[in-house]
Image (cartoon, rainbow, N blue to C red):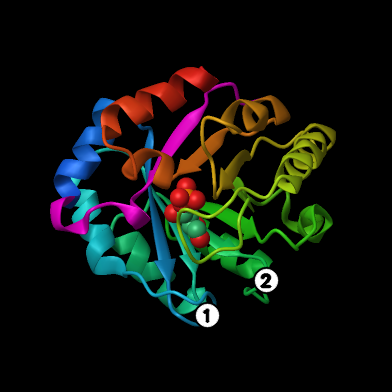
Protein backbone atom coordinates (compact mmCIF):
# COMPACT_ATOMS: atom_id res chain seq x y z
CA UNK A 1 0.00 0.00 0.00
CA UNK A 2 1.31 3.42 -0.90
CA UNK A 3 0.50 6.16 1.56
CA UNK A 4 2.57 9.10 0.29
CA UNK A 5 0.55 11.38 -1.97
CA UNK A 6 2.38 12.95 -4.89
CA UNK A 7 1.64 16.20 -6.72
CA UNK A 8 2.97 16.04 -10.29
CA UNK A 9 2.88 19.57 -11.69
CA UNK A 10 2.14 19.48 -15.42
CA UNK A 11 4.04 22.17 -17.33
CA UNK A 12 1.83 21.88 -20.45
CA UNK A 13 0.07 25.19 -19.83
CA UNK A 14 2.89 26.93 -17.99
CA UNK A 15 4.68 30.00 -19.31
CA UNK A 16 7.47 28.42 -21.39
CA UNK A 17 9.25 31.74 -21.72
CA UNK A 18 9.89 31.50 -17.95
CA UNK A 19 10.04 27.74 -17.50
CA UNK A 20 12.78 27.72 -14.85
CA UNK A 21 10.91 30.28 -12.75
CA UNK A 22 7.57 28.46 -13.15
CA UNK A 23 9.11 25.17 -12.02
CA UNK A 24 10.79 26.92 -9.10
CA UNK A 25 7.44 28.39 -7.99
CA UNK A 26 5.70 25.00 -7.90
CA UNK A 27 8.73 23.40 -6.19
CA UNK A 28 8.47 26.03 -3.46
CA UNK A 29 4.87 24.94 -2.94
CA UNK A 30 5.95 21.32 -2.40
CA UNK A 31 5.48 19.78 -5.87
CA UNK A 32 6.85 16.23 -5.86
CA UNK A 33 7.26 15.49 -9.58
CA UNK A 34 7.36 17.50 -12.83
CA UNK A 35 4.99 16.05 -15.45
CA UNK A 36 5.88 16.50 -19.15
CA UNK A 37 3.19 15.93 -21.78
CA UNK A 38 4.60 14.76 -25.10
CA UNK A 39 2.12 15.11 -27.98
CA UNK A 40 2.74 14.48 -31.66
CA UNK A 41 -0.36 15.85 -33.39
CA UNK A 42 -1.28 12.28 -34.40
CA UNK A 43 -2.10 10.18 -31.35
CA UNK A 44 -3.68 13.36 -29.96
CA UNK A 45 -4.76 16.50 -31.84
CA UNK A 46 -2.09 18.73 -30.33
CA UNK A 47 1.66 19.14 -30.64
CA UNK A 48 4.03 19.93 -27.77
CA UNK A 49 7.73 19.21 -27.29
CA UNK A 50 10.33 16.46 -27.33
CA UNK A 51 13.48 15.27 -25.54
CA UNK A 52 15.27 18.63 -25.89
CA UNK A 53 12.78 20.30 -23.53
CA UNK A 54 12.79 17.29 -21.18
CA UNK A 55 16.56 17.70 -20.99
CA UNK A 56 16.10 21.38 -20.09
CA UNK A 57 13.59 20.43 -17.36
CA UNK A 58 16.11 17.90 -16.09
CA UNK A 59 18.66 20.71 -15.68
CA UNK A 60 16.19 23.01 -13.92
CA UNK A 61 14.96 20.59 -11.25
CA UNK A 62 16.13 17.74 -9.04
CA UNK A 63 12.55 16.41 -8.77
CA UNK A 64 11.61 13.21 -10.64
CA UNK A 65 10.62 13.94 -14.24
CA UNK A 66 7.41 12.14 -15.26
CA UNK A 67 7.10 11.79 -19.04
CA UNK A 68 3.65 11.04 -20.49
CA UNK A 69 3.97 9.90 -24.11
CA UNK A 70 0.88 10.70 -26.17
CA UNK A 71 2.54 9.81 -29.45
CA UNK A 72 2.39 7.22 -32.23
CA UNK A 73 5.10 4.56 -32.02
CA UNK A 74 6.55 5.52 -28.61
CA UNK A 75 8.99 2.57 -28.81
CA UNK A 76 11.12 4.51 -31.29
CA UNK A 77 11.76 7.32 -28.80
CA UNK A 78 12.04 5.60 -25.41
CA UNK A 79 15.81 5.77 -25.36
CA UNK A 80 15.89 9.45 -26.31
CA UNK A 81 13.54 10.45 -23.47
CA UNK A 82 15.39 8.34 -20.91
CA UNK A 83 18.74 9.78 -22.03
CA UNK A 84 17.18 13.24 -21.68
CA UNK A 85 16.56 12.48 -18.00
CA UNK A 86 13.05 11.02 -17.69
CA UNK A 87 12.67 9.01 -14.47
CA UNK A 88 9.18 7.76 -15.26
CA UNK A 89 7.92 6.92 -18.76
CA UNK A 90 4.24 6.27 -19.38
CA UNK A 91 2.91 4.87 -22.66
CA UNK A 92 -0.71 4.48 -23.77
CA UNK A 93 -2.32 1.03 -23.82
CA UNK A 94 -4.35 2.14 -26.88
CA UNK A 95 -1.21 2.73 -28.94
CA UNK A 96 1.29 0.08 -27.88
CA UNK A 97 0.73 -3.31 -29.50
CA UNK A 98 3.36 -5.28 -27.56
CA UNK A 99 2.81 -3.75 -24.16
CA UNK A 100 4.70 -6.45 -22.28
CA UNK A 101 7.77 -5.85 -24.46
CA UNK A 102 7.59 -2.05 -24.24
CA UNK A 103 7.20 -1.93 -20.46
CA UNK A 104 10.06 -4.39 -20.02
CA UNK A 105 12.24 -2.27 -22.31
CA UNK A 106 11.54 0.93 -20.35
CA UNK A 107 12.70 -0.84 -17.19
CA UNK A 108 15.79 -2.27 -18.91
CA UNK A 109 16.70 1.25 -20.00
CA UNK A 110 16.65 2.31 -16.35
CA UNK A 111 13.35 4.18 -15.96
CA UNK A 112 10.14 3.34 -14.12
CA UNK A 113 7.43 2.03 -16.45
CA UNK A 114 3.87 3.33 -16.57
CA UNK A 115 0.82 2.54 -18.67
CA UNK A 116 -1.99 5.03 -19.35
CA UNK A 117 -5.60 4.43 -20.35
CA UNK A 118 -8.04 6.87 -21.92
CA UNK A 119 -11.49 7.53 -20.40
CA UNK A 120 -13.11 5.02 -22.80
CA UNK A 121 -10.63 2.20 -22.08
CA UNK A 122 -11.60 -0.25 -19.31
CA UNK A 123 -9.38 -1.32 -16.39
CA UNK A 124 -9.69 -4.95 -17.50
CA UNK A 125 -7.48 -4.17 -20.53
CA UNK A 126 -4.55 -4.02 -18.07
CA UNK A 127 -4.90 -7.29 -16.19
CA UNK A 128 -2.12 -9.08 -18.12
CA UNK A 129 0.49 -6.38 -17.44
CA UNK A 130 -0.51 -5.44 -13.92
CA UNK A 131 2.43 -7.28 -12.35
CA UNK A 132 4.87 -5.58 -14.69
CA UNK A 133 4.02 -1.92 -14.22
CA UNK A 134 5.36 0.61 -11.74
CA UNK A 135 2.47 3.00 -12.41
CA UNK A 136 -0.99 3.09 -13.99
CA UNK A 137 -2.27 6.44 -15.25
CA UNK A 138 -6.03 6.93 -15.45
CA UNK A 139 -6.87 9.74 -17.87
CA UNK A 140 -9.65 11.83 -16.36
CA UNK A 141 -10.02 13.88 -19.57
CA UNK A 142 -9.57 12.89 -23.22
CA UNK A 143 -5.84 13.54 -23.72
CA UNK A 144 -4.60 16.45 -25.79
CA UNK A 145 -5.19 19.67 -23.90
CA UNK A 146 -4.89 21.24 -20.48
CA UNK A 147 -7.79 22.98 -18.77
CA UNK A 148 -10.52 20.46 -19.69
CA UNK A 149 -13.44 19.35 -17.54
CA UNK A 150 -12.87 16.39 -15.19
CA UNK A 151 -14.71 13.20 -16.26
CA UNK A 152 -16.44 11.96 -13.11
CA UNK A 153 -16.47 8.24 -14.02
CA UNK A 154 -12.67 8.27 -13.50
CA UNK A 155 -13.26 8.05 -9.75
CA UNK A 156 -15.03 4.70 -10.16
CA UNK A 157 -12.15 3.47 -12.36
CA UNK A 158 -9.66 4.40 -9.65
CA UNK A 159 -11.68 2.45 -7.08
CA UNK A 160 -11.68 -0.54 -9.43
CA UNK A 161 -7.94 -0.28 -10.04
CA UNK A 162 -7.26 0.07 -6.32
CA UNK A 163 -9.25 -3.14 -5.71
CA UNK A 164 -7.27 -4.91 -8.44
CA UNK A 165 -4.03 -3.73 -6.82
CA UNK A 166 -5.09 -5.22 -3.49
CA UNK A 167 -6.32 -8.47 -5.05
CA UNK A 168 -3.09 -8.99 -6.99
CA UNK A 169 -0.85 -7.83 -4.09
CA UNK A 170 0.78 -5.35 -6.49
CA UNK A 171 2.39 -2.08 -5.48
CA UNK A 172 2.21 0.09 -8.60
CA UNK A 173 1.28 3.74 -8.15
CA UNK A 174 -2.12 5.00 -9.32
CA UNK A 175 -1.93 8.34 -11.14
CA UNK A 176 -4.85 10.50 -12.35
CA UNK A 177 -4.42 13.14 -15.04
CA UNK A 178 -6.78 15.81 -16.32
CA UNK A 179 -9.13 18.36 -14.78
CA UNK A 180 -7.83 17.85 -11.24
CA UNK A 181 -8.67 20.72 -8.89
CA UNK A 182 -9.56 21.38 -5.27
CA UNK A 183 -13.10 20.22 -6.16
CA UNK A 184 -12.09 16.60 -6.81
CA UNK A 185 -8.57 15.93 -5.46
CA UNK A 186 -9.79 14.67 -2.08
CA UNK A 187 -12.29 12.30 -3.68
CA UNK A 188 -9.53 10.91 -5.90
CA UNK A 189 -7.23 10.43 -2.91
CA UNK A 190 -9.95 8.56 -1.03
CA UNK A 191 -10.49 6.30 -4.05
CA UNK A 192 -6.84 5.21 -3.88
CA UNK A 193 -5.06 7.67 -6.17
CA UNK A 194 -1.40 8.32 -5.26
CA UNK A 195 -0.18 10.72 -7.97
CA UNK A 196 -2.19 13.80 -8.97
CA UNK A 197 -1.20 15.43 -12.25
CA UNK A 198 -2.20 19.08 -12.06
CA UNK A 199 -1.83 21.61 -14.87
CA UNK A 200 -4.28 24.47 -14.95
CA UNK A 201 -5.09 24.40 -11.21
CA UNK A 202 -1.41 25.21 -10.58
CA UNK A 203 0.07 27.03 -13.59
CA UNK A 204 -3.18 28.76 -14.51
CA UNK A 205 -3.35 30.45 -11.10
CA UNK A 206 -1.95 33.85 -10.15
CA UNK A 207 0.12 32.40 -7.31
CA UNK A 208 1.65 29.10 -8.45
CA UNK A 209 3.28 28.41 -5.08
CA UNK A 210 0.10 29.03 -3.07
CA UNK A 211 -1.98 26.90 -5.48
CA UNK A 212 0.48 24.01 -5.10
CA UNK A 213 0.46 24.28 -1.30
CA UNK A 214 -3.34 24.31 -1.17
CA UNK A 215 -3.72 21.15 -3.28
CA UNK A 216 -0.96 19.35 -1.43
CA UNK A 217 -2.51 20.13 1.94
CA UNK A 218 -5.80 18.66 0.78
CA UNK A 219 -4.30 15.20 0.26
CA UNK A 220 -1.76 15.06 3.09
C1 LIG B 1 -3.77 16.26 -20.98
C2 LIG B 1 -2.45 16.08 -20.29
C3 LIG B 1 -2.44 16.61 -18.89
C4 LIG B 1 -2.70 18.09 -18.75
C5 LIG B 1 -3.46 18.28 -17.48
O1 LIG B 1 -3.79 15.50 -22.14
O2 LIG B 1 -2.08 14.73 -20.24
O3 LIG B 1 -1.25 16.24 -18.21
O4 LIG B 1 -1.54 18.88 -18.69
O5 LIG B 1 -3.85 19.61 -17.40
P1 LIG B 1 -5.09 20.07 -16.53
O6 LIG B 1 -4.75 19.80 -15.09
O7 LIG B 1 -5.20 21.52 -16.83
O8 LIG B 1 -6.29 19.28 -16.97
ZN1 LIG C 1 -0.31 14.14 -18.88
Badge nearest the viewer, 1 or 2: 2
Look at the numbered disc 1 and give the secondary structure of its residue.
loop
Residue 162, above or below 107: above
Residue at (59% x, 21% y) in the render: 3
Residue 133, above or below 209: below
- Of residues 54 and 183, the one nearer the viewer is 183
Give residue 153's position: percent from left, percent from top: 76, 47
Give residue 213's position: percent from left, percent from top: 36, 23
Res 111 seen here: no
Disc ID at residue 89: none
Contact (CB < 8 A) between labels 1 and 2? Answer: no
Q: Which residues are magenta?
A: 1-18
Q: Say whether disc 1 or disc 2 marks the residue closer to the N-terminus.
A: 1
Provide the residue designation for mark 2: 94
Residue at (52% x, 26% y) in the render: 5
On whether residue 12 falls in the magenta region, the answer is: yes
Q: Left or right: where does residue 154 sit relative to residue 23?
A: right
Quadrant of the image occupied by residue 160: top right
- Of residues 105 and 77, the one nearer the viewer is 77
Amino acid sequence: MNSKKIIASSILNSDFSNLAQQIRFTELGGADWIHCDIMDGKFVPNLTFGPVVVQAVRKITKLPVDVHLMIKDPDALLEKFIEAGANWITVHQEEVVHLNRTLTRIKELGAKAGVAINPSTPIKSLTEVINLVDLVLIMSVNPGFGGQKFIQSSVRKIHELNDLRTKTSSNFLIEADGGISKNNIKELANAGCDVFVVGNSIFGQDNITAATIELKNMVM
